[in-house]
Image: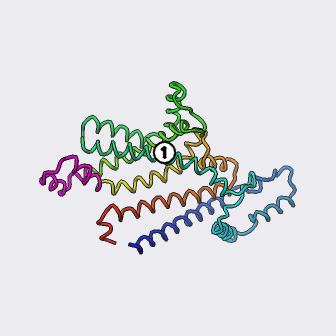
Amino acid sequence: MARSIIERILTALLVVFGSTFLVFTILYVLPGDPVDTILDPSVSTPEMIEKLRQELGVDQPFHIQLFQYFSDLFQGNFGHSLVNSTPVLPQILEQFPKTLALTLASASISIVLGLTLGVLSAIHRNKAIDILARVIGLFGISMPTFWTGILLILIFSVHLGWFPSLGSDGWQTLILPAFTLGVIGAGSIIRMVRNSMLEVISENFITTLRSKGLSERVIMYRHALRNALIPALTMMGMIIGDMLAGTVIIETVFSRQGIGRLIADAIMASDLPVVQGVIFFTAILYITINLIVDISYTIIDPRVRRSI
């Protein structure tokens, strides 16, 4: 098992650095010069521009720039912002707690709502709760994030005045953006858990448990649900990772601070070091979450342990 975990960790590291290489390559081939973000070409002399290019290292060939970038990453240096010349990593760490709070709140809503409705939908198939759960699941999957956020602002902020629509100060400002991401994530979990539960309920061991006289509640919630959660775990890990990426839209719609808003502002300002730093940081988080979910299979499913 230890060997299997080590192999998965090494694979995760390859994915992180592969994605970093891909992002660096894309930003390298895009038109535009980072020097233009710092200097005004209309008032700068060619000597000033060339000197700054040498200081930034953008006059070097691609492979040298790539090697230098990875060398800096290994030393914990994410570079400096082209806009305000401040280190990138402290900016990310300063904004990350706000994004983490939003992600955890959204994930909690998704998991609780998704598991509850998914299980009830499977147990009470073709009944009112099943129809309601499928409608909520379809809504969560179909609706764009920005549209759902704007809709909640219009209803609960503009018309009802229950919650603030903008800002990131206080728990009240967290409710609407967290619910926006949470409902969208819950849609996928509802469908996955429902389908998994229906498959498990039709298995022979469920019939055996019923023949032994166990109550329906024990069978569903102790035995069927545990087996149905195994495929749903992958979906939950992916959803939490997608929420980190989805904060770019949500933090912009709700004017919240966070790494999503940070990278959105950096893209608008062509601040490439900040863009690269946030993507690398987010890639590490995404891979780590999925790695934890992958390893948790060995704890939940004894069949995985036996195969290892």
Q: Is residue 55 left or right of residue 125?
A: right
Residue 191 to residue 161: above or below:
below
Confirm whether the magenta stretch covers residue 224. yes
Between 59 and 160, the one lying in front of the other is 160
Q: Residue furthest bottom?
A: 3
| Residue at horizontal 76 percent and vertical 63 percent from the top | 56
Q: Is residue 85 left or right of residue 277?
A: right
Q: Position of residue 209 (x, y in %)?
A: 16, 54
Q: Which residues are magenta?
A: 198-226
- Which color scheme is applied? rainbow
The quadrant holding residue 6 is bottom left
Which amino acid type is marked by label 1?
Ala
Q: Position of residue 159 (x, y in %)?
A: 52, 24
Q: Position of residue 47 (x, y in %)?
A: 87, 61
Quarter of the C terminus within the rendering: bottom left
Q: Residue furthest top?
A: 159
Confirm whether the magenta stretch covers residue 170. no
Between 297 and 57, the one lying in front of the other is 297
Q: Is residue 119 left or right of residue 251?
A: left
Disc 1 is placed on an element classified as: helix
Q: Position of residue 92 (x, y in %)?
A: 63, 54
**Would you call the spot at circle 1 few (<14 residues within 10 Å), some (14-19), or many (20 or more)?**
some
| Most common SS among magenta residues | helix
Quarter of the N terminus within the rendering: bottom left
Q: How many marks?
A: 1
| Residue at horizontal 82 percent and vertical 52 percent from the top | 41
- Residue marked by disc 1: 105
